[in-house]
Amino acid sequence: MINKDIGKVLISEKELDATVSRLAEEINRDYVGEDHRLVLLCILKGSIVFMGDLMKKISVPLEIDCMRVSSYGAGTSSSGNVNIIMDIMRSDLHDCDLLIVEDIIDSGRTLAYLTKYLLNKGAKSVKTCTLLDKPSRRVVEFTPDYVGLEIPDEFVVGYGLDYAEKYRALPYVGVLKPEVYSGEDA
Ligand code: IMP
Ligand code: MG
């Protein structure tokens, strides 16, 4: 059953599953061998569902870690600043091949900032994997290493993505009905 606030389903459960499988295969291929120490870095909270599904499909040895950042206010437009709310806490970063796992890349600010931040902090390598990409919205030039699907400039929810903290648990990615957020003052 589709949630009453969803105008249309953009990406079905089946398509999400196929996309995550494809990304996992690409990652398995690139990180095979003894010379990598793969650490998947989940960017909370939006990437939590994607990360859980992705890690189960990766067959090379891996560790996980989390960071929490925010660039959005409560609504559908970016504030332009990236704030670190919870930092990665490990003393062995210089040994880690970090793969940032992100739900969606929009302006590019979050991933551009995080990549630089983690390299400055001493990580051995930093790559990025995003489930969704809105290339038409880029403000900062940034190309992720792994991209699930490119989507048009529409605000999407579900599969971890929220609007005002709601809709994260939907198993598909959908577009909200305009009346759901038409009252926002962002
Ligand atoms: P960026 O820094 O502008 O690339 O923004 C990335 C972050 O904005 C993502 O991690 C999401 O949390 C949020 N975001 C961007 N577009 C959407 C959307 O369509 N739905 C929900 N969150 C979004
Ligand atoms: Mg996010």
Image (cartoon, grey):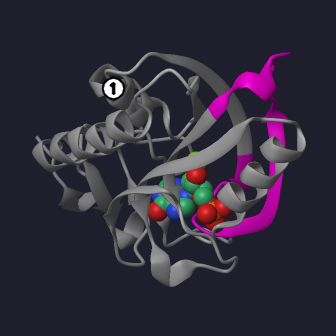
Residue 14 drawn at (x, y percent): 11, 43
Q: Which residues are magenta?
A: 70-97
Q: Is residue 88 left or right of residue 60?
A: right
Q: From the Cβ of disc 1, is ligand 2 less than 8 Å away?
A: no
Compared with 93, 172 (above or below) is below
Q: Position of residue 140 (x, y in %)?
A: 70, 76
Quadrant hosting residue 147:
bottom left
Quadrant of the image containing the N terminus: top left
Secondary structure category for the residue under label 1: loop
Say which of 96 and 158 sits in front.
Answer: 96
**Dot 1 crowding, Cα within 10 Å, few <14, some 14–19, many 20+:** some
* Residue annotated with mark 1: 58
Image height of 109 relative to 41, above or below = below
Three-letter amino acid code at the position of disc 1: Ile
In the displayed structure image, the side of residue 47 where residue 94 appears, left or right: right
Q: Quadrant of residue 59?
A: top left
Residue 73 showing in the rendered view: no
Total marks shown come to 1
Identity of the residue drawn at 63% across and 32% down: 97
Image point 39% across, 69% down: which residue? 179
**x%, y% of residue 149?**
31, 62
* Residue 186, picture quadrant: bottom right
Q: Is residue 55 left or right of residue 15?
A: right
Q: Is residue 59 magenta?
A: no
Q: Position of residue 104 (x, y in %)?
A: 49, 56
In the displayed structure, 95 sits above or below 73; it is: above
**Residue 56 makes an appearance in the image:** yes
Residue 84: within the magenta?
A: yes
Pick the front one: 23 or 140: 23
Residue drawn at x 79%, y 42% as measured from the top left: 118
